Image (spheres, grey):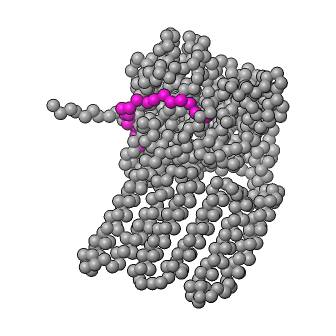
Amino acid sequence: MSYCVNCGVELGKAEQRCPLCGTEVVNPNEPYDPKAKRLYPRQLDSPLVSLRGRRIAALVMTLLFFFAGGMCIFLNAVYAGEVTWAYYPAGALCMLWVFLFPPLMLQTKPAVTFLLSALFDALALGGFLWMCETLTDGAWFLPFALPVTGMVLGFLILNAALILPRVVKGAYIGVPVMLTVALLLVGLECIVDAYLSGTVHLTWSLYALAPCLILAGFFLFVGRYRTVKEELRRRLHM
Amino acid sequence: MKKRKRVKRWMKLDNSAMIYPAIRNARFSTMFRVSVTLTEEVDPKVLQAALEDTVMRIPFFGMRLRTGLFWRYLEQNDGVPQVETDVANPCKPIGKGENGGFLFRVRVDGCRIALEPFHVLTDGNGAMVFLKTLAARYLTLTGKKIPFTDGVLDTGARPKKGELEDAFSKYAAFRKRAPRRESKAYHFKGTLEPFPTLHIISATIPLGPLLEKARAAKATLTEFLAANYILALHRLQTAERHLREKDVKLCVPVNLRKFFPSDTLRNFVLYLTPGIDPGYGDYTLEEIVEQVHCQMRMRLNQKYIAAQICTNVSDERNPFIRMVPLILKDWAMSMAFRVVGESCFSATLSNLGETKIPDEMRPYVKRFDFLLGASKINRGNLTAVSYDGSLVLNFTRTTKETFIEREFFTQLVKLGIPVKIESNDQ
């Protein structure tokens, strides 16, 4: 029989390390036997939870949206003789459906679900805005709406790819978030300037850039020094 | 001739079962597990036959949960529950429509038979009767002679009415209600593991030396274990250096069958919350044992328990509450559980006591285990069950850190009590 030199407890034969403190078991008389009968098997219960409730919710939502959109088009066509305003509510409902349907039905890892949902959301939003532009004979989709939508999508994807799989964690999360917020704001001003005047002259985004960079540095500092992190956690915990 | 449709049997949920469907979610399973380890390898096919017989004897295990307009209820399930192979992370919640609608799982691994019921069906004592009956039936089918005593039921007999009763309604004395208000308790945080990870640390301790220590401290075994657990939690809170330390309290289920003459196999437990207020200063183990002992003794009497039952049952009988649709009741119950339930205790300690089985069954049984699923708020629980001079303690947690378990067991080792540790770590 082996004992943990750190905790003083006897350890089961299948334990390679002390389950209490993680100290490795070193016993020349009775070395660790990986074939020893374990208290529990290695097989894990599936993490999947039932989709039944979600499927019902998705079905009800689809029927509801289809009915509401169809009614708008029908009433518009009957009373006005042609479809005019009904494109907007019907398009908005389609967009909303795309926003809600994938998160309800996807059963992948949280990071993958988020990335796929964000991609679908951006496509739906882009499609809706393009429809609005076409219906109003505007010329703002390509120079303004599309770059802004793409930029926000890039912001979400970059942060999700870093945060959800825990590539960055704890206080370090604040660093990419603040840096990408700064980039987003600068990019937004560039797009607005280019759309309105045709030239780019950065002003207000630089004022927003400074605090973002300071905050990113602050999060880097807090993440780097454990004592500072503990002190902040102690004083600010709720 | 037109075939007449058979009316399915149904039963109301017992008083304490009503809250469990409302508060269950992916992170709070409200499942628990009792298991028995036999001396011989279990044959799953024979166990399947034994399971089918046992479900006929304790019929509410063969029911599914249905939703009515005002209350949930149990309805006869025409399917057959299946024996499954065991896993490393038990007590995963049973989702709606999963598991063929059955509210329990029976799992087998080598020599071990495990029963994992949803708390809506029964409590630890009811589950233990089911498990003992199942194991006895299994042994009978493999050619052994097991008598129907010590909680082993005759699977050939008809279920008794008293075994299926809602004992809460029967014993609620409508004289005075016990107050519900309690102070908020400390909850350790730790790093939450991804769902459905459940870390289990199992300790086997000889009962003699532990009982000796408990008696020397003028406490029962449960009180002594509770004091040790509170001390470990108290030390963790102190190490975390909070500006204002909260009370450290445990939720300790009490088997009400000891106080009321009921044979029910459904839920019949209430919870006490002994603990300490760290605001008064630092505590030694002896001081905590004394505190826990006094608090438990003060509340463990039939009058006070009847008043506590009355508090719960009177809500169920209130005509205005009864008229409220279930969806609103669910919301109110989950809110109430958050405010006056899980926020008022730091962790759970459940001691099933000594497991008695017929003498003829003893040569075939090695040990019993008892586990509780952990929740997102109360991230660790401790359970105890003793058999044949050994106490098996099981710590379950959903966090990475093992500070509390280590404090708890090293404290016992310091007291001179030998502890053997096993785990489900991969």
Is residue B61 depicted above or below A133 in this figure?
above
Using the image, determine if residue B69 lies above or below residue B304: below
Q: Where does the image place residue B346, in percent across and percent down from the top left?
A: 67, 44
Q: Residue at x 37, y 45 (%)?
A: B68
Q: Is residue B184 visible?
A: yes
Q: Can residue B293 be seen from the camera position used here?
A: no
Classify residue A121 as left or right of residue B11.
right
Query: In the rendered structure, does residue B205 fall within the stretch colored magenta?
Result: no
Residue at 74% in and 77% down: A210
> Residue B80 colored magenta?
yes
Relative horizontal placement of residue B210, taking residue A109 as reference (left or right): right
B405 relative to B217, above or below: below
Q: Is A220 rendered above or below residue B30?
A: below
Residue A131, x across and y down, in percent: 42, 75
Which quadrant does the N terminus of chain A fall into? top right
Residue nearer the viewer, B405 or B42: B42
Q: In the image, is B395 to the left or to the right of B34? A: right
Which residues are drawn in magenta? B72-88
Residue at image point 53% right, 59% down: A116
Could you tell whether A201 is left or right of B171 in the image? right
Q: Give residue B51's position: percent from left, percent from top.
A: 46, 24
Pick whichever, B162 or B349, lies toward us. B349
Image quadrant holding the C terminus of chain A, namely bottom right
Q: Nearer the viewer, residue A17 or B240?
A: A17
